[in-house]
Amino acid sequence: MTKPKQDERDRVAALIDQNLRLVYSDLVKEDLPDRFKDLLAVLKAQDTESGGKS
Amino acid sequence: MNRPKKGSDPRDAMLDHLPALRAFALSLTRNGATADDMVQDTVVKAWTNMDKFQPGTNMRAWLFTILRNTYYSSRRKLNREVADPEGTMVAGLSVKPDHDGHLNLTDFKKVFETLPDEQREALILVGASGFSYEEAADMCGVAIGTIKSRANRGRARLTELLGLDGNSPIEMTDNATMAVVAGGGSVLR
């Protein structure tokens, strides 16, 4: 009685994780807004300006 | 003086992690504008604290940790806690899979978003982004058992809300019966 129940729970958990991965990978695939590339460029430029001295 | 050569600067690797970082932020905040602000804050913090990053360790985990700390401290500040953190107000929100057990992804998302932050976070970290329980525990600053129990409670709640309970045949649509089945769950408080 308990074994099929455990099997069923495992099956459901696997189904949930599979859907989680789908949802998450959809989000990862979204285009990265330009503001982040711009931000990294600005941060890099600031570092170059300060020359890394001090 | 000991500044690493340009090619080995860990800052150069940051861009590669941003899509995943943003996906994590979106899952956590459930709001695009807030998520992007969180990512921006995280990038600036990480950039200026890069000397605290240990080369050779997992940069993605490090960035995720900064982001979640940012999120939880701003949440505390805003004190925007919902009066119903366990989501009982969505108790009526229950979707059923098709007869072949196929889940509608939109329904899944909707229900997932009703889970408490800690459960969503645990499920995203270990269920979706492939971190180990140990890594996730480390990132969240809790014991491995805590992450496991958060993930399990999240799965149990999703099972319940999505009507995936093995004991309830999908055809069983009678509300009273469904409530009895749901009442057997251990996550109700």
Image (tube, rainbow, N blue to C red):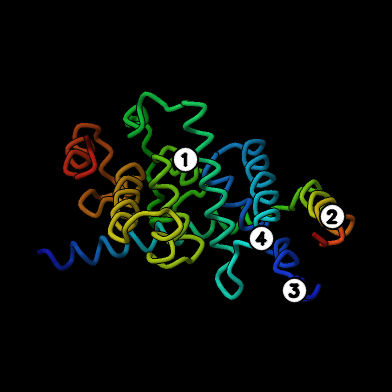
Please name the residue shown 61% across and 72% down the image: B55
The label number, if any, that marks residue B4 in the structure image: 3
In space, the residues marked 3 and 2 are separated at their CA atoms by 19 Å
Q: Quadrant of the C terminus of chain B?
A: top left
Which residue lies at the image location 31% right of the left edge and 30% below the top edge? B88
Q: Which residue is mark 4?
A: B50
- Chain letter of disc 3 in the image: B
CA gap, disc 1 and disc 4 = 32 Å
Residue on which the image places disc 1: B113
Q: Nearer the viewer, mark 4 or mark 2?
A: 4
Labelled disc at residue A41: 2
Outermost residue toward the front? Answer: A54
Q: Nearer the viewer, residue B49 or B101?
A: B49
Marks 4/3: CA–CA distance: 11 Å
| Residue at far left of view | A1
Question: Badges 1 and 4: C-beta atoms under 8 Å apart?
Answer: no
Q: CA distance from mark 3 to mark 1?
A: 42 Å
Bin the neighbour count of mark 4 within 10 Å (Cα to Cα): few under 14, some 14-19, many 20 and up. some
For marks 1 and 2, give the CA distance.
Answer: 34 Å
Type of amino acid at the residue the image marks with label 1: Glu
Q: What chain does badge 4 belong to?
A: B
- Secondary element at image label 3: loop
Badge nearest the viewer, 1 or 2: 2
Q: Nearer the viewer, residue A40 or B3?
A: B3
User: Of callouts 4 and 3, which one flags the residue occurring earlier in the amino acid sequence?
Assistant: 3
Quarter of the image that includes the N terminus of chain B = bottom right
Q: Identify the mark at residue B16; answer none if there is no mark.
A: none
Q: Nearer the viewer, mark 1 or mark 4?
A: 4
Depicted A38 relative to depicted B52: above or below: above
Q: Secondary structure under badge 1?
A: loop
